[in-house]
Image: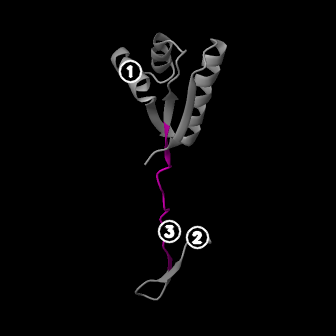
């Protein structure tokens, strides 16, 4: 009850007013794939489909963006989810002996 400020009603009696919580949206993070000259494009497409749940067309578009621009956004998530996605990509790439790199940065 320490969070509730005291107020007096018109009749002089004491009343409590509930404090409204101040909720903010959590910061969001972009998960990024970095281009390399060794990871096959089909492997990148499969990662985008399995880890990021992209359809084939979107996965190919993102893969081509990574290939031509050197970097591509896989998705925007809360920090915990973004970190998990990065770790999943890195582990899967390592298990398949590909040097694919994945990172995150705070979204604007």
Where's residue 30, x and y in %?
Answer: 48, 38
| Colouring style | one colour
The residue shown at (50%, 28%) is 33
The residue shown at (50%, 24%) is 35
Q: Identify the residue position indicated by label 1 in the image.
A: 64
Circle 2 residues within 10 Å: few <14, some 14–19, many ≥20: few
Q: Identify the residue position indicated by label 2 in the image.
A: 3
Where's residue 52, x and y in %?
Answer: 47, 24
Task: Describe the element under mark 1 as helix, strand or loop.
Answer: helix
Q: CA distance from mark 1 to mark 2?
A: 54 Å
Task: Describe the element under mark 3 as helix, strand or loop.
Answer: loop
Q: Which residues are magenta?
A: 15-30
Q: Identify the residue position indicated by label 3 in the image.
A: 19
The answer to whether 65 appears left or right of 4 in the picture is: left
Circle 1 residues within 10 Å: few <14, some 14–19, many ≥20: some
The residue shown at (37%, 14%) is 56
- In the rendered view, would you say 93 is above or below 106? above
């Amino acid at each position: 009850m320490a969070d509730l400020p005291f107020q007096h009603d018109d009749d002089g009696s004491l009343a409590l007013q509930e404090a409204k919580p101040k909720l903010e949206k959590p910061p969001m993070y972009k998960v990024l794939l970095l281009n390399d000259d060794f990871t096959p494009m089909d492997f990148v497409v499969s990662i985008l489909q399995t880890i990021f749940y992209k359809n084939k067309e979107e996965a190919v578009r993102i893969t081509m963006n990574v290939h031509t621009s050197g970097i591509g956004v896989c998705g925007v998530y809360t920090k915990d989810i973004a970190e998990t996605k990065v770790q999943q990509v890195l582990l899967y790439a390592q298990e398949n002996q590909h040097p694919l790199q994945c990172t995150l940065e705070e979204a604007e």
